[in-house]
Each structure stands twice: as C-alpha cells, then as structure tokens.
Image: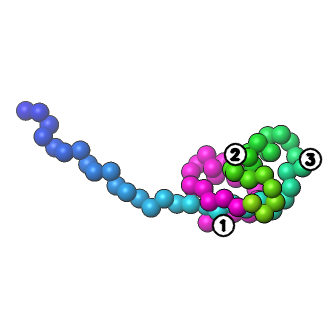
Amino acid sequence: MANDRKAPAKQLRRQETLTVRQIRSQARRPAVQEATLRGLGLGKIGRQKTLEDTPAIRGMIRKVAHLIEVAE
C-alpha cells in the first residue's frame, strides 16, 4: 500500500534577531568593508537595523565588527 502517513507539520520557531548599530565611520576603509556595511543596511554612524540571526549575517558582522555594535 501507499504510504498513508501525513507529512509532519512545519514547526514554527521564534525568529532570532540581532540589532546592529554603526559606531565608527566607513571612511578610509576597504571597499569590501563599505559594501558589507551597506549589505547590513548601515552606512552612517548611529544607524541601527534589526536583522535575522543567520549564518550569513553573522559572517558579515564578523567582517566589520570593529565598526559596529551588536545587541542580541
């Protein structure tokens, strides 16, 4: 007989978020770091964004950790 089991329902998990705030200027930094800040939605000192906590975002944060502040 065919498999009569129902597919498991997707479990909803609470989305983890990170709040990042730019605390230092991107002036005189490599273009890669400037692009990473733009990718995070930052670009001026004091700007703040709330982002999903994903491995990609964590990697971007690591690249510009000296320019930003992270609150979990």
Indicate whether 5 appears above or below 66: above
Can residue 34 be seen?
yes
Q: Which mark is residue 71?
A: 1
Residue appearing at x 56%, y 51% in the figure: 54
Residue appearing at x 75%, y 60% in the figure: 47
Question: Quarter holding the C terminus?
Answer: bottom right
**Residue on which disc 3 sits:** 28
Q: For residue 45: magenta?
A: no
Indicate whether 69 appears above or below 7: below
Dot 1 alpha-carbon crowd within 10 angstroms: few under 14, some 14 to 19, many 20 or more: few
Q: Label 1 is placed on what type of residue? A: Ala
| Nearest the eye: 69 or 55 | 69
**Residues marked 3 and 1 touching at CB (< 8 Å):** no
Can residue 66 be seen?
no
Q: Which residues are magenta?
A: 48-72
Could you tell me how far apart the alpha carbons at marks 3 and 1 are, in whole angstroms? 26 Å
Q: For residue 63: magenta?
A: yes
